[in-house]
Amino acid sequence: MTERSLRLGFPVKVMGKPGLKSNDTRRWQAGPHLKCSLEHVDKILDYLKSVELDMYRLSSDLAPYATHPDMPQFHNMVAESDAELAALGRKARELDMRLSFHPSQYVLLNSPNPELTAKSIWDLSSQAEMLDRMGLDDEAVMVTHVGGVYDDHEASRARWIEGWERCPEHVRRRLVLENDDIRFSCADVLWIHERTGVRLIFDYQHMWCLNPERLDMRETLEKFLASWPKGVRPKIHFSSPRTEMREVKQKVTAKDRAAAKDGKARTRKGEVTKAPVKATARVKTVLRPPIWTGHADFTNPFEFATFMRMAEGLKFDVMMEGKSKDISLLKLRPDLLRFAPDVAARFGITDAKAEALARDEAALEGGVSAEEEPDVDEGLLAAAE
């Protein structure tokens, strides 16, 4: 039997087809439900099949308010949706589509607050239960980070293990641990793996942002992949860093407006504004250099091809975390075929698909805008401190 090609996937929000929602976003007063969210995801799977994408990260809000401590009316929705979860899982298996979760930055197993840890385990239990009721195999995982440092890096790292040990079996079976970009490096999560056996997710951009131990990338990637059991294909995360200027909105003071009115508009040392500050302005747009932990809208095909050639001979699926979501993949596939056909072939992208891929790429010229809100993986874990 021929081994399936490596997969490319994206997280949560669909941008390539208008009207597709990733979950039921109604407020609690309207009685949102997991069953409604699953109807939305069912349509997303149809879209993914039409564009031949076969890996997708489910919204962490798929079951709205299911673990809200003050809303017991929602606590049984996962069990109430057993038939619908089973149907969606069956459809995903028929399409050979890999699904996963990435719980939010507020899910923390290493919190010094035992109540927050307990709530986090409840959140993880709910998501693991959904994957179990879908009947998905061990490739369907929940990705988490170590969490906050809380003024003691080593103690916080060790406390994650205590949180892990408190998790029920069905959570430990699904949970995988990712290196992050500002707190816990590849070396840190390898240390945890050696003491727990938890599977690891290698994040390429995060390793560039945080690698004080100066670990070798190929050797580290191999160790991460080896944390997965035989017969279960690992997956990794890949993204390119943002390179464009950041646009930051700031209030214009009365003094600034007065100076502008007198023709003496002033800026602080080193400050670059997108446009001159007018005498009537209330807000100005300040341009600042990029933060390298931020994800770019699209994946740099040359960077990705270089990485994949470095990883020659290794097998893993790739969750692409470009902020343009599925759009970034519709652009990346023809780019790989054009610039790195050897890498494209590993993902089943061949000349036979060139015409269809070219149509997808041409359709992008209609215009795409990246979402403004930050992703969970962009170094914004302040809540964990």
Image (cartoon, helix red, strand yellow):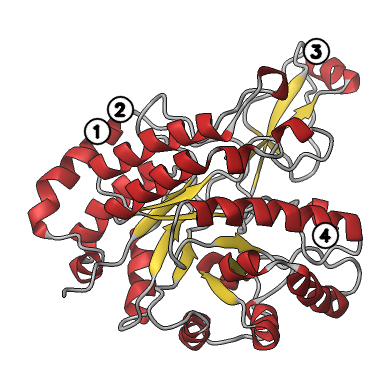
Q: Are marks 1 and 2 in contact (CB under 8 Å)?
A: yes
Considering only order in the chain, which callout, 4 or 3, is on the residue closer to the N terminus?
Answer: 4
| Labels 3, 4: front one | 4
Q: Are marks 3 and 1 in contact (CB under 8 Å)?
A: no
Number of the label disc, if any, that sits on residue 363: 1
Considering only order in the chain, which callout, 2 or 3, is on the residue closer to the N terminus?
Answer: 3
- Distance Cα–Cα, label 3 vs label 4: 55 Å
Count of labels in the image: 4
In the rendered structure, the answer to whether residue 143 lies left or right of residue 337 reads right
Q: Position of residue 314 (x, y in %)?
A: 35, 81
Q: Residue at x 79, y 44 (%)?
A: 269
Q: Residues within 10 Å of mark 1 (few under 14, many from 20)?
A: few
Instruction: Give the farthest residue toward the left.
Output: 352
Name the residue tied to disc 3. Answer: 261
- Distance Cα–Cα, label 1 vs label 4: 46 Å
Amino acid type at image mark 1: Ala
Name the residue tied to disc 4. Answer: 117
Q: Residue at x 87, y 23 (%)?
A: 253
Considering only order in the chain, which callout, 4 or 2, is on the residue closer to the N terminus?
Answer: 4
